[in-house]
Image (cartoon, rainbow, N blue to C red):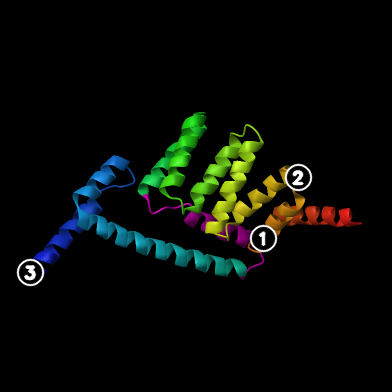
Amino acid sequence: MTSRHLQLKFLLICAVFNSVNFSNASAEVKEEIFDRSPELKDQGEFVARHKIADSQDQTARLFKRLAQTSEAREQSLLASAILKHWSQSNSDTAMLLLSRSNHAAKIGEKDLARKLADDVVSLEPQWSEALIYRARLQLAQSDGQGDLKAAIADLETALGLEPRRFDALELLGRLYESLGDQRKALEAYQKALTFLSANPELQAQERRLRLSLEQEKH
């Protein structure tokens, strides 16, 4: 095949790829498209790798700015931007399943919401957002300490993937505190404060627990 033919083939692949609205397509349709065209799948993986790199670079820049400010409102705005980056997956199927799980939870379909959350984690086990979402879902639908421990396990796994997840650290602190483990709760709050040093709620929680533990020593 000549270089001219290769170029035309590549342009045709690009045209097909760009004409598909993946945000509205079902998972089955997406898989069918990829199975039909190995070249298209390769291009999609290439694009995804670059999206991941771009997202990581942008998150790193936001964290750099976060470390350079001690103003509460600016920290809050930067934190929101970081959370928005973390909430995105390069898997359209994972995003679709997460959206459906959230909808199921809102209309009271508890079992369906949990199953879909499990499916998201199985599909994207390295996506910290999926684990934190499932932890929050477990807490919202909690039937007892078993759910709390499962939520803690998901949060700790998420932090193993992304140690800067200040949202997971704050939630982990609250859960440890509810279970009576003040030392672990304090540690989680203090770690969260390394990123959100001006957050008044975190400051209050950390101070309260620290003073409580100091009083126990005397």
Horizontally, residue 17 falls left or right of residue 123, namely left
Alpha-carbon span between mark 3 and mark 1:
58 Å
Q: Which of the two discs, 2 and 3, labels the residue nearer the N terminus?
A: 3
Q: Quadrant of residue 97?
A: top left
Alpha-carbon distance for marks 2 and 1?
19 Å
Q: Residues within 10 Å of mark 1 (few under 14, many from 20)?
A: some
Horizontal side of residue 2 vs 183, given as left or right: left
**Amino acid type assigned to the residue bearing label 1 in the image:** Lys
Residue type highlighted by circle 2? Gly
Residue 85 lies in the magenta-colored region: yes
The x, y position of residue 119, in whole percent, is 43, 41
Q: What stretch is highlighted in magenta?
A: 68-91
Which percent across, then down, holds residue 173? 68, 50
Residue shown at 22% from the left, 48% from the top: 35
- On screen, residue 129 versus residue 6, left or right, reads right
- Of marks 2 and 3, the one in the foreground: 2
Where does label 3 land, which residue? 2
Task: Work out whether mark 3 precedes mark 1 in sequence or the reverse, and give the earlier one.
Answer: 3
The image quadrant that residue 6 belongs to is: bottom left
Image coords of residue 11 (percent x, y): 17, 61
Inspect this view and state whether residue 46 appears. yes
Q: Which residue in the rendered view is the most extreme toward the top?
A: 108
Q: Is residue 146 left or right of residue 95?
A: right
Vertical arrangement, residue 159 with respect to residue 100, above or below:
below
